[in-house]
Amino acid sequence: MVLISKLSLTLLLALAITIPPLSQSKELKETYMSFYVNDYSAGPNSTVAAIAGIPGKQWTVTQFGTIYITDDPIMDNPDPNSAPIGRSLGTYVTSALDGLILHVSISVVFTAKEYMGSTLELQGAYKHFERRSEISVVSGTGQFRFARGYATFETYSWDPNTAHAIFLWNFTVLHYHSSNTNNMCGDHWV
């Protein structure tokens, strides 16, 4: 038993010596991005849907306990006919008793341009009736490994007749980026 403990300690010490710390192998970057999220909450091409709620209550965005799932296209401009650069995948839960706050858990999955294959993870309280609301960036993958920061959500346009909303999302993100990866961190899409 003592031999196994000494071997384990020796192995851990060897790994600690041979693996460089993250701060030595990566460079911390700050990236600013802006893009537009198209949200269709009704019709045959709906990208958001209520999937659960309190029994006996109407499932609406202002009803406490209503859960939504979303798969919204992300564009680099407000034109809904432009080519998507990613998807906003996740859930919204009306978590405030008064219906004014949603808890969001969203994965921004990039499918085009220089961030293709990377993700940013968002989580927090979204005050959906305020002009501007802030959400935490809690993680990321690919070019956004170890990301942290914040995103602001603003309503760019809303058409009640078609239930189509366009949101402007602005990101400020700190993340580690390998110095030998060829990308354009720090550039704006918009």
Image (cartoon, rainbow, N blue to C red):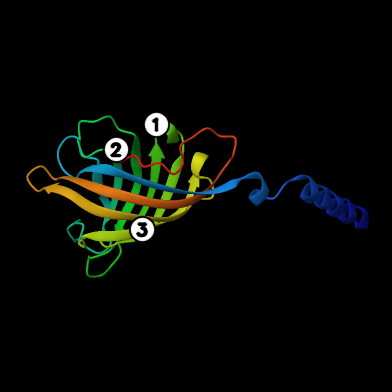
Return the disc, 3 or 2, that comes first in the chain's sequence.
2
Distance from the alpha carbon under mark 3 to that under mark 2: 20 Å
Residue tagged 2: 76
Asked which secondary structure carries label 1, the reply is helix
Q: Position of residue 126 (x, y in %)?
A: 30, 60
Along the horizontal axis of the image, is 98 left or right of 184?
left
Q: Are marks 2 and 1 in contact (CB under 8 Å)?
A: yes
Along the horizontal axis of the image, is 33 left or right of 162?
right
Along the horizontal axis of the image, is 151 left or right of 118?
left
Distance from the alpha carbon under mark 2 to that under mark 1: 10 Å
Task: Please state which amino acid type lies under the numbered disc 3.
Answer: Ile
Closer-to-camera residue (5/19): 19
Residue tagged 1: 113
Q: Is residue 65 above or below residue 189?
A: below
Q: Position of residue 53 (x, y in %)?
A: 26, 57
Closer-to-camera residue (170/184): 184
Q: Position of residue 189 (x, y in %)?
A: 34, 39
Residue sitting at 25 percent across and 59 percent down?
132
Residue sitting at 31 percent across and 57 percent down?
93
Q: Position of residue 44 (x, y in %)?
A: 16, 35
Q: Is residue 64 above or below residue 71?
A: below
Residue sitting at 28 percent across and 41 percent down?
72
Closer-to-camera residue (55/80): 80
Q: Is residue 54 visible?
A: no
Task: Please state which amino acid type lies under the numbered disc 1.
Answer: Lys
Asked which secondary structure carries label 2, the reply is loop
Give the mark toward the camera: 3 or 1: 1
Q: Is residue 172 visible?
A: yes
Residue tagged 3: 135
